[in-house]
Image: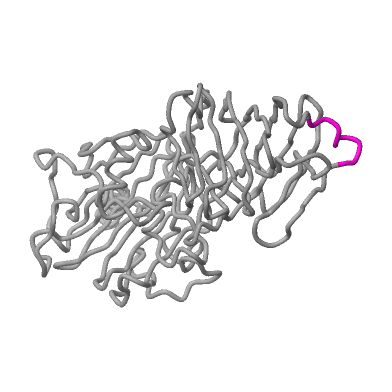
Amino acid sequence: MKHLIILLSTTTLILCGCVQQHNRLSKDERAAGWTLLFDGTSMNGWRDYNGNSLTAPWHVVDGCIQAKGLGGDADGYIVTEEQFENFELSWDWKLSKGGNSGMLYHVVERPMFPVPYVTGPEYQLIDDDNFEYPLEEWQKLGVDYAMHLPDKNLMNVHPAGEWNNSKIVFDNGHVEHWLNGVKILEFEAWTDDWFQRKNSGKWANAPEYGLAKKGVLCLQDHGSPASFRNLKIRPLPRKTKEVELFNGVDLKGWEAFGTELWYVQDGLLICESGPDKEYGYLATREYYDDFDLTVEFKQQADGNSGVFIRSFIEKGVRINGWQVEVAPLNQHTGSIYESYGRGWITPIPNDTENALQYGDWNTLRIKVQGDNITSWLNGLEVVNLRDEKIGAGQGRIALQIHDGGGIKILWRNLRLMTL
């Protein structure tokens, strides 16, 4: 009997050893840089979208994060406390019959964005076969929501109530969707095709959709229970590149906001006040967060303008971000102005005012990396600042026309290196 007990105990240990340990990383996974987003027992690391704590209808059940099914289009979203840029993300998920959920990434949190999907792309999770309403193809399982469709022939889906595994790879704009170990979709973000899809479909009136290069991850409670486990992520390195922001021919790669005038003439980019004499902006269609930018400008008439960094445009042609000033003599060219909140952050030192060559070509260099911003005017350092708010910002580069009328400025050689 003693030998039988020992044999049974050994067999039990062997069987237990074969049981998969969920919400754990192997030694090889840790060595490869994977980290867990869910510890299996608590909601640590998660909070409400645009919130400071967790009040949304989510809880932990049997080692899974579970949506209670009480959310809707306007609420029920939870996000990671940490932001992610380039990554490989894997998770297991299980839906109730007819269930609907999703995994969003690069989500931007600001009060003017009431829901996460107006900024963050979504890997759609939905029970196509049992959903209560007819679905468009761009709403079905595995899609890049309202943008790109997966290859249906590659999809092997376990039915509602059973576990599936999904993966998103985001590698410097190259995106892959995987389902149960098979790649079902890949595309390149921020190409001409990508922008055509964005501007002609559901996101035509969501100007900041999909532009962020980093952000929080988001899970969606869309009115039906959904369970998640084994959520894990590993970072991928950022790649640098050179960008010619202005091609000397047309305004490709830029978007105009307002009624002021932006045009190309004799290989120059020209901004000029229009009849409304209001603020106007010409913004890059892409976000640039860390970069080294050089631009040349010549001021004609009133030279009041500027280069905004890490900025976005709100309704009513209102810009939110930080401006490196371009202005007439003794009006702080090269200094930093915050469009909402603090105003002037660093007025230009008096001994650098004469660096501006009014009416002639000037070279402005702007380097932004993390929380540090440095500006040079014609080779002379004007500002070298570390600022927590700037460090947390992201967004477009934008040229400004100040209000009041009578402004005309020429621009050329807008060149940038991402960092």
Which image quarter holds the N terminus?
bottom left
Q: Position of residue 112 (x, y in %)?
A: 49, 65
Q: Nearer the viewer, residue 178 or 411?
A: 411
Can you tell which quarter of the image residue 363 is in?
top right
- In the image, the segment drawn in magenta is 349-356
Height in image: 51 above or below 321? below
Residue 260 drawn in magenta: no
The image quarter containing residue 278 is: bottom right
The residue nearer to you, when weighing 163 against 384, is 384
Q: Quadrant of the C terminus?
A: top right
Horizontal and vertical percent position of residue 394? 56, 47
> What residue is rendered at 31% in x and 74% in y?
68
Q: Is residue 82 left or right of residue 101?
A: right
The overriding secondary structure of the stretch rendered in magenta is: helix
| Left or right: 336, with 90 as reference point | right
Residue 355 within the segment the image draws in magenta: yes
Please provide percent x and percent y for residue 210: 39, 47
